[in-house]
Image (tube, rainbow, N blue to C red):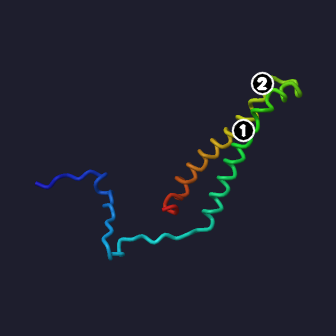
Amino acid sequence: MPTERTALHEHQNPAPTYEEGNTSNKTDFRLYKIRWLFLATVACQNMATTMITVSFSPVATLATQYYKVSGNEIDLIAIVPWAFNAAGMFLAIYSIGRFKLLTSIR
C-alpha cells in the first residue's frame, strides 16, 4: 500500500551532494551591482541612526537646559530615527513578498 506524502515532502528539494570531480551540482552565482547599492544604502542608514543615538547621550542634559524642554521631548530625537528604521523594515518585507523579490535574491 503506497504511503501518502504530505505537501511539505513534495516541495522539499534534496540537499545537493558534491563529490570530488563532479561539478554538475555546483551553482553558478551572478553578481548584480544594484544589490551592492542597496546594501550600501541600508548600511549607511543604520550607521547614521547609530551615530545619532550614540552622540545624543552626552548632550541630552545640556539640550534640555538650553531649549527649556523636558527630557522626554529630547528623548524623541533618538527614538524617531529608530521608528523610521522599523517602518522601513516592514515596507521592505512587504515589497519582497509583493514584487517577488525573494526569487531574485536566490
Indicate which disc, 1 or 2, sits on the residue closer to the N terminus: 1
Q: Amino acid at mark 2?
A: Gly
- Compared with 19, 106 (above or below) is above
Q: Which residue is mark 2?
A: 71
89 relative to 97 in the view: left or right? right
**Res 13 → quadrant:** bottom left
Q: Which residue is mark 1?
A: 54
At 65% from the left edge and 53% from the top edge, which residue is drawn?
42
- How many marks are shown on the rendered structure? 2
Horizontal and vertical percent position of residue 69: 84, 24
Q: Amino acid at mark 1?
A: Val
At 50% from the left edge and 58% from the top edge, which residue is drawn?
102
Horizontal and vertical percent position of residue 81: 71, 40
Horizontal and vertical percent position of residue 82: 67, 39
- Compared with 60, 86 (above or below) is below
**Res 51 → quadrant:** top right
Residue 98 or residue 43, whichever sits in front: 43
8 relative to 79 in the view: left or right? left
Separation of residues labelled 1 and 2 (CA atoms): 16 Å
At 72% from the left edge and 37% from the top edge, which residue is drawn?
80
Horizontal and vertical percent position of residue 7: 30, 52
72 relative to 64 in the view: left or right? left
68 relative to 29 in the view: left or right? right
Label 2 secondary element: helix
Number of residues whose C-alpha sits closer than 10 Å to that of mark 2, classed few (under 14), some (14–19) or many (20 or more): few
For the residues labelled 1 and 2, say whether their Cβ atoms are less than 8 Å apart. Answer: no
